[in-house]
Image (cartoon, helix red, strand yellow):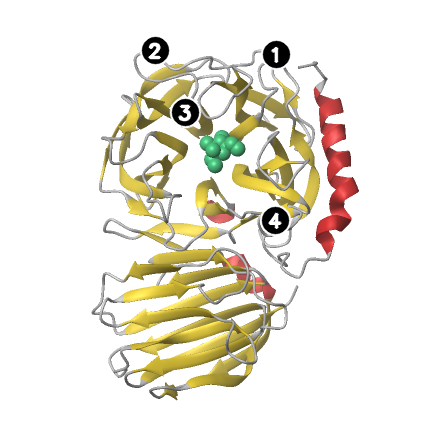
């Protein structure tokens, strides 16, 4: 490959995006309030950081196509986590060591500057993927938070310790500071077992391998992608996306461990793995510390732009606050700032849905809405009940969110949602003795996110209905459903 200098590679990428903007602009499925690429491909959130009073969100981006490839770091920022401003591309492949991609990583602030850490990707044969790769860890620095200069010391980590990891799958550095030292977790593998490694540094340049944080016993996949280790509510939480641990129907799995991390030894003791999202489209989440010390998470909502005949692909979830309040479970809820989008409010008190009814409620419909529906499970005797959103007039097109009393599952059914992938996902509510069932829903044209109870479970997925399908209907089967309250907002965009 011919060597080009970084600013030139960035310029070329920005020009490509600029020239194609109109191609994605008029799509009714483009999202109104989610962070999403103006055109072309998006994957993982990278470099999340609250820096000089603003939130920065970088993401894996192909500035030349709606499909994965030629991976750059694109960049947005926001003052409130809700309104995003697109910035110039931050990192482009340009050096001998990263010419086949600037893969996922993270950002930290040091002496007023922003440092980003990423994985340089090189194909070691013309075929490249999936295994003929050389992956190393690199850094770039910025004084203005917009223009990045790759360090002359790159790659700062050239290879994992030979008995522990392989150089072809060694990626996704997440860096943070603890007391006087910097720490980095990295995804790795050896002999088809996924691992997370931890490194330590005093200066962000020289890194010393500390330990293996966790390792797949075979059941947790062959490669651990996008690890993130942080403390919340007195616990040390490790996020990871274990490649190969999903199923054929549900291949992308992301989740977490709750435990205690020993900063001296790099040893991690933890509870059982839990999923972060029970929907269809969620992967490679990353967190940052936000204003007020909150732990804020974004996940990637994958989308096949090509199959959908679109010039854009993918989105971030809405920002979610991660909390811990006991037991082996995190609470995941929309950040407070999401309330800023609330426009016209419609409140309904007690409302009864009788068996066989499929009932609209005047004032409740739309494609960019937020809704909190609380059911009283003690007075509800329906076998299943819930709501249909994005319904067509004739009721044929619809997306169903329902509760199945027998299995204690909340179900997200997109078999009749319109274009795109179909399927049904279920999420078992473990505390079935709950008196109330709270469904907190965000719709944004083609994105649906559902938060259940007090952030105990989340389900996310894309749907691609007709633009005119904007109905919302409430239904019950085999008995009556007693809605305790509905709060509904049109979102002001
Ligand atoms: C996760 C991932 C990362 C990698 C990046 C490449 O989706 O495979 O492990 O760094 O995407 O785009």
Circle 1 crowding by C-alpha within 10 Å: few under 14, some 14–19, many from 20: few
Foreground mark, 3 or 2, reads: 2
Residue at mark 3: 183
Label 3, secondary structure: give it: strand
- Looking at the image, which residue is at 76% across and 29% down? 11
Q: Quadrant of the C terminus?
A: bottom right
How many dots with numbers? 4
Return the mark for residue 162: 2
Mark pair 1, 3: CA separation: 21 Å
1 and 3 marks in contact (CB < 8 Å): no
Q: CA distance from mark 2 to mark 4?
A: 39 Å
Q: Secondary structure at mark 1?
A: loop
Q: Residues within 10 Å of mark 2 (few under 14, many from 20)?
A: few
Judge whether 144 appears above or below 2 on screen: below
Please determine whether, in this image, residue 7 is positioned above or below residue 482. above
Q: Position of residue 55 (x, y in %)?
A: 59, 43
Q: Residue at x 36, y 71 (%)?
A: 402
- Dot 4 and dot 3 residues touching (CB under 8 Å): no
Residue under pointer 4: 36
**Residue tagged 1:** 152
- Residue 42 in sight in this render: yes
Closer mark to the observer between disc 1 and disc 3: 1
Question: Element under label 2?
Answer: loop
Q: Is residue 104 above or below residue 285?
A: above
Given residues 104 and 219, the one toward you in this image is: 219
**269 vs 462, nearest the viewer:** 462
């Amino acid at each position: 490959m011919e060597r080009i200098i970084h600013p030139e590679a960035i310029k070329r990428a920005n020009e490509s995006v600029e020239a194609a903007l109109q191609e994605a602009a008029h799509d009714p499925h483009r999202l109104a309030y989610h962070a999403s690429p103006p055109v072309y491909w998006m994957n993982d959130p990278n470099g999340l950081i609250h820096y000089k009073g603003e939130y920065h969100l970088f993401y894996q981006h192909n500035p030349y196509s709606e499909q994965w490839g030629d991976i750059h770091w694109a960049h947005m920022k926001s003052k409130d986590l809700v309104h995003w401003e697109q910035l110039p591309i931050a990192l482009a492949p340009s050096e001998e060591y990263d010419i086949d991609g600037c893969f996922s990583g993270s950002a930290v602030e040091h002496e007023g500057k922003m440092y980003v850490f990423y994985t340089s990707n090189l194909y070691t044969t013309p075929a490249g993927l999936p295994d003929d790769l050389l992956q190393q860890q690199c850094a770039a620095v910025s004084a203005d938070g917009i223009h990045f200069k790759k360090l002359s010391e790159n790659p700062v980590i050239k290879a994992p310790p030979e008995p522990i990891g392989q150089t072809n799958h060694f990626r996704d550095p997440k860096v943070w500071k603890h007391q006087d030292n910097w720490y980095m977790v990295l995804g790795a593998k050896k002999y088809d077992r996924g691992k997370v490694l931890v490194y330590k540094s005093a200066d962000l340049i020289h890194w010393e391998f500390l330990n293996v944080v966790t390792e797949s016993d075979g059941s947790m996949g062959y490669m651990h992608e996008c690890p993130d280790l942080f403390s919340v509510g007195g616990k040390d939480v490790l996020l990871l996306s274990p490649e190969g641990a999903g199923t054929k129907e549900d291949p992308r799995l992301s989740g977490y461990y709750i435990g205690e991390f020993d900063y001296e030894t790099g040893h991690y003791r933890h509870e059982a793995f839990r999923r972060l999202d029970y929907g269809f489209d969620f992967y490679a989440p990353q967190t940052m510390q936000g204003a007020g010390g909150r732990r804020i998470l974004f996940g990637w909502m994958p989308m096949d732009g090509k199959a959908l005949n679109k010039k854009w692909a993918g989105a971030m979830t809405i920002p979610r606050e991660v909390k811990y309040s006991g037991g082996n479970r995190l609470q995941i809820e929309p950040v407070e700032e999401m309330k800023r989008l609330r426009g016209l409010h419609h409140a309904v008190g007690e409302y009864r849905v009788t068996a066989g009814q499929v009932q609209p409620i005047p004032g409740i419909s739309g494609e960019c809405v937020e809704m909190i529906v609380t059911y009283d499970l003690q007075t509800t005797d329906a076998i299943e009940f819930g709501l249909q959103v994005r319904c067509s007039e004739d009721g044929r097109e619809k997306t169903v969110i329902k509760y199945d009393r027998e299995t204690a599952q909340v179900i997200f059914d997109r078999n009749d949602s319109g274009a795109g992938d179909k399927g049904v996902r279920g999420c078992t509510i473990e505390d079935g003795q709950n008196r109330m069932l709270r469904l907190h829903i965000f719709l944004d044209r083609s994105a649906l996110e559902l938060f259940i109870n007090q952030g105990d479970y989340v389900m996310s997925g894309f749907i691609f209905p007709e633009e005119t399908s904007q109905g919302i209907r409430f239904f019950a089967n085999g008995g009556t459903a007693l809605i305790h309250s509905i709060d509904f907002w049109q979102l002001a965009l």
